[in-house]
Amino acid sequence: MASSSAPRARRVDGVNGLSLHVLEAGEPTAPCVVLLHGFPELAYSWRKILAPLADAGFYVLAPDQRGYGETTGWDPRYDGDLGSFTLAHLANDVLSLLRKLNVGQAHLAGHDFGSPVAGACALLAPEKVRSVAFMSGPFGGAQPAVSRASAGLHAQLAALDPPRKHYQWYYSTREADRDMRQCPQGIHAFLRAYYHMKSADWPGNKPFALEGWNAEALARLPRYYVMDLDKTMPQTVAPQDPQSAPAWLTDEELKVYSDAFERTGFQGALNWYRCSTGGQSVASMQGAAGRQVVAPACYIAGRADWGIHQKPGELERMRDKACADFRGIHLVEGAGHWVQQEQPAAVARLLIDFFRSA
């Protein structure tokens, strides 16, 4: 008989219009933890975290979020239902899952774009959130610390030598999905280079705080954040392709991602960025403007993760204003952006200690 801590897959239908593919571990009667992935990830990104959390006495759920993997019911079109990808709608996917499974309260951990989804859950339904761990992406509240809609910024970036552009606005273009789906090197090699370039393995990842939200400051970010104006993302990362997968992400593991995105494309995932850059996500959270996260909160990132500083001021806003009970920043040695995959044992220990204390 399989151990209850061994991860298993299930499907949960009727979740805010979705049929949700979920990885789970542990006993459903135990305190619940929900793990929320980012881009370009899957529930599978938590594969090394599920069993340790279950062994520590938690019931763990990791869904393929809207736009990703084996979850179905979302609109894959660029000209489709963009409103279903707003931050509030994504949070309601998670809250609907909890209701569907009769979970009263849950601890949340969100990585990358999963971080603001976790934060939105905590703001919209504080009674459902026992604690929240923000990972890689700082959560500054319902209103961003910087004006990401600054019209002049893009002209300023384009006027630099060499001309640059911000990746989130590139991801919001009609062409981005096609660029990645049909890239010359293929999705598998593209993702291998992308994961490598944002990991601790890439020597260019030595992050530091930026002085502000302006072209000169942002241009100090690596090219995967502030790209050359004339390049696609596959063209940006291709020169850094390590040609072979690292120990923390074997070729077999990488194939889970490449197979998934070859099947679904990237547009559903990219619609999250469109709602961010277009203002729809901020508008969807207007009812929570000014609220603090009242649940105990912490922040975890790889020490080599530029995501800590990619939005100047957001880390400080999270620590000082957005959270009423903020319990610390943890930077994990030997990890870049993919902290729960690069250093899973350290991340599991941090999450277990935090959830037990919350």
Image (cartoon, rainbow, N blue to C red):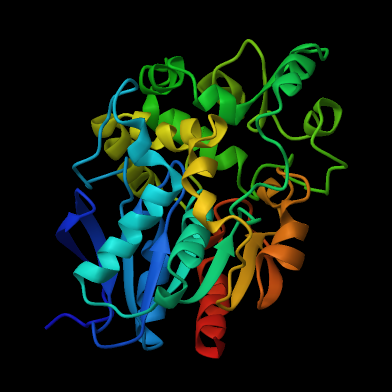
In the rendered view, tell whether residue 139 sits above or below residue 347.
above
Q: Quadrant of the image for the N terminus?
A: bottom left
Say which residue appears at 65% left-offset and 50% top-offset: 200
Say which residue appears at 71% left-offset and 19% top-offset: 154
Say which residue appears at 82% left-offset and 48% top-offset: 208
Q: Nearer the viewer, residue 216 or 207?
A: 216
Picture coordinates of residue 174, whole percent (x, y): 43, 16
Res. 177 image quadrant: top left
Picture coordinates of residue 263, whole percent (x, y): 24, 32
Picture coordinates of residue 222, whole percent (x, y): 72, 33
Q: Nearer the viewer, residue 344 or 160?
A: 160
Q: How many marks?
A: 0
Res. 103 image quadrant: bottom left
In the rendered view, tell whether residue 191 sits above or below residue 19.
above
In the rendered view, tell whether residue 197 sits above or below residue 223.
below
Picture coordinates of residue 270, whole percent (x, y): 43, 32
> Does the rendering let one see residue 248?
no
Q: Quadrant of the image for the C terminus?
A: bottom right
> Does the rendering let one see residue 121?
yes
Using residue 139 as the reference point, say whether residue 84 is left or right of it. Answer: left
Using residue 307 as the reference point, say whether residue 178 is left or right of it. Answer: left
Using residue 81 as the reference point, say whether residue 348 is left or right of it. Answer: right
